[in-house]
Amino acid sequence: MRLEHIKLAGLQGAITIIATGIVYLLRTPLAAQSVAFGCGVALCGTLYLGWKFVQGQKVAERGAAWAMRQAYATAVGRFALMAALLAMGMGYLKLAPLWVLAGLIGGQSAWLAVPVWMRLTSLNKIEKTR
C-alpha cells in the first residue's frame, strides 16, 4: 500500500478510538458501539481501495481503458461493500442508525484531513532543508 493509504488508515483508526471513547463517556455503550462500527465501515472502505490499488499496480501496463473499467468496478465494489456493512450493522446487529452514520461520517472525514496533513508535512520538510 502507498504511504497515503497507510496514513489514512492510521488516522481513521485514531478517529475510531477517540470518537468511541468520547461517545462512551457522554452517551451510552450502545451509541459507542454504533460509532465504532460506523468508523470501522469507513476503514473497511479505505482498506478495500488500498487493496484494489495494489492489485492495479501489478497489471498497470494493460492500458487506459482497462484502468478506467477497474476504477469504475472499484467504486461500485466499495459502495456495495459499505452498503452491505451498514445494512448489517443497522439491521442484523441492531445498532443505533444515527450513531452508525455519525461514525461513518467521522471516519470518512479523515479523507479530508490527510491531504492537508500530507501537504503540511511536505512543506515542513522543504523548510527544514533550506
Image (spheres, rainbow, N blue to C red):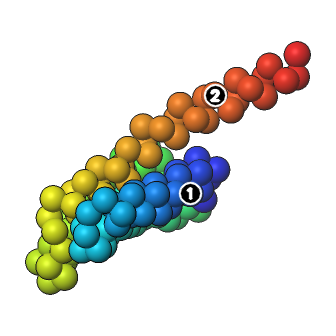
In the structure shown, which secondary structural element does the residue marked by tag 2 occupy? Answer: helix
- Which residue extends farthest bottom? 92
Looking at the image, which residue sits at the far right? 130
Q: Is residue 65 visible?
A: no
Residue 48 visible in image: yes
Question: Label 2 crowding class (10 Å Cα cut-off): few <14, some 14-19, many 20+?
Answer: few
Q: Is residue 55 left or right of residue 86?
A: right
Packing grade of label 1 (10 A; few <14, some 14-19, many >=20) is some
As drawn, the label of residue 120 is 2
Residue at 74% across, 26% down: 124
Classify the position of the C terminus by image quarter: top right
**Residue ID at (43%, 43%):** 111
Q: Quadrant of residue 36?
A: bottom left
Q: Is residue 78 left or right of residue 1?
A: left
Numbered label attached to residue 88: none
Q: 16 and 71: which one is in front?
A: 16
Seen in the picture, residue 99 relative to 91 is either above or below; the reply is above
Q: From the top left corner, tell me how far across and down residue 75 is, in percent.
A: 30, 54
Q: CA distance from mark 2 to mark 1?
A: 17 Å
The amino acid type, in three-letter code, at marker 1 is Gly
Residue drawn at point x = 88 percent, y = 22 percent: 129
Label 1, on which residue? 10
Q: How far across and down, in percent of the image, does residue 24 sit?
A: 34, 66
Amino acid bearing label 2:
Leu
